[in-house]
Image: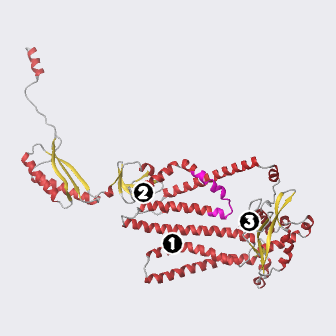
Amino acid sequence: MFTAFGRGNSGRRAICALLACWWMLTCASGQSLADQVEKSKSQNSTPAEEAAEETKDPLGRSTPHGTVFGFLQAAQGGKNKEAAQYLQLSKEERDTVGEDLAYQLHELMDNSFVGRVGAISDKPEGSPQNGVSQDHERIGVFRINGNETRVDLVRTYDPKAGEIWLFSSDVLTKVPELYGQIENSEIESGLPRFLSTRRILSTPLWRLVAWLLLIPIAFALAWGVVHLLRAGQRMWLRWRHHPFLEDVHQSIAGPAILILTVVFHQIGVHFLGIPLLIRVYYRQLTGVLLVAGAAWLIFRLINRWGERARVMAAEDSGYHSGSILLLGQRIVKALVVIAALLAMFSILGFDMTTAIAGLGIGSIAIAFAAQKTLENLFGGISILGDQVIRVGETCRIDNKVGVVEDISLRSTRIRTLDRTELSVPNGELANMNLENISRQDKSLFRTTIGLRHETSPAQLRSLLTKMRTLIFQHPKVGSEAARVRLIGIGENSLDVEINCYILTSDMGVFLAIREELLLRIMDLVADASMEFARPSRALYLTKEGGADARSAKAEDPAA
């Protein structure tokens, strides 16, 4: 009776169109807003700021975030000489001990660093922090044997690159000592040498193998936990039946396995000690998977709730319309998709400030660009809110009669009596004269029969009495508005009108009762030796000529 969200092709197309328009217009408006901001900045910028803009650092050290990621990427690729450019060292120190310090610092970042790398400020001036001077940025600590060492960046001036951020010299003086305190993994001592010595992306091969093996292990653990909970739920439901809990468990099984797999894998990876840069990318990937799993879970719950709510709507006429629940379900899903996409882009590091700032402008642009789509959307909401029609009901639109199959975001689909599919945009449907046949409490039976003019008044009175008796005594005919009357003497017949209401709203039952009444009326006419009138024309012939013939005979004596 009701179609699921995934089966509504027009609904999916409308949602996809809305999402595409929203995203493109938002990005466009956001970009326009960003351009205006940049233009305003350029107009109001000072000569010092313009000079800083001209001397932009090619290594990306103009922000704390750029310095940390640039160092990690260079050191991860084995480019220790380039990585030394991110350290606060003199030219002589950078040439002599720079590469060694870069290697040792990278090892400390991979094994002992505690902090949120993704939250490091991406502003040239850094972020204000309590207890930290304005030209310093604290990004985290090194935690070794229970002791913590602060890791700071310092803002300095470079003649070629301008204002840049570097790992402070205070931290670098402690790096050799801290590096010597790093303990080798006990696992590596028991592994074949090639697994611990061979490295891919500066990571021992055994850690990459363990990372891959954790995937099926985490999946098996997640699957076991979910099915263990299902077994416990079944045991509990033996004592107390609760259909809603059964539906919810079936809905969340798949998404729960995905979410638990990611969580268990994250726990395992935490003890592997993979490099910091790879760990950052890994957290972004798992964050996207968690958002996707959460969106999937919400989708399944919305579907399950929608199906149950529509069943209740079908069983209880006092409950909300099942069709408006279906439309609401689709709108909520569209909002979930938008929220999930925004969360994913934010996790991947995209700056959503511009997109959110342009959301208001994009919404106005959408209102003009998708005017017809929005008109149809609000038209559908108006129809469903007034409960003019529901899915499964029979209605008449203009001269078309059919059953409502689906009310989507854009249009309403009706299966006509000819078995064709009629699609009417909701915006137009809201302004049409719509007749809901399914909601009639009884069916009108009206017909006019014609009797021959040769019927005598006595015969007609007797027939009318018998026909009234037939109509009034029938158990399925309402007597309050029933009538059988001679309504006119026509050119070809004596016209008798029969008007009554048959007490049924079912079309099939109505057709059967109407057929029965018409056949019994034919029997009454035949028993009274009367006949139905047929269209006829009378022609009268005489032997006398007309006036023209007599005049011609008088003028011609020979005739």
Residue at left offset 65%, top offset 70%? 286
x, y percent for residue 132: 78, 67
Asked if the residue at tag 2 contacts the one at tag 1, i.e. Cβ–Cβ closer than 8 Å, the answer is no
Residue 7 at least partly seen:
no
Amino acid type at circle 1 is Ser
Residue that protrudes farthest toward the bottom in the picture: 190
Q: Is residue 341 magenta?
A: no
Distance from the alpha carbon under mark 1 to that under mark 2: 29 Å
x, y percent for residue 45: 77, 49
Magenta region, residue range: 343-363
Asked if residue 19 is positioned above or below residue 241 in the image, the reply reads above
Give the mark, 2 or 3, whose residue is nearer the N terminus. 3
Q: Which residue is mark 3?
A: 120
Label 1 crowd (10 A; few <14 / some 14-19 / many >=20): many
Amino acid type at circle 2 is Gly
Amino acid type at circle 3 is Ile
Distance from the alpha carbon under mark 1 to that under mark 3: 39 Å
Q: Which residue is mark 1?
A: 251
Q: Please state, as top left, top right, bottom left or bottom right, where the N terminus lies in the image.
A: bottom left
The local secondary structure at tag 2 comes to: helix
Residue 467 at least partly seen:
yes
Residue at left offset 84%, top offset 67%? 168
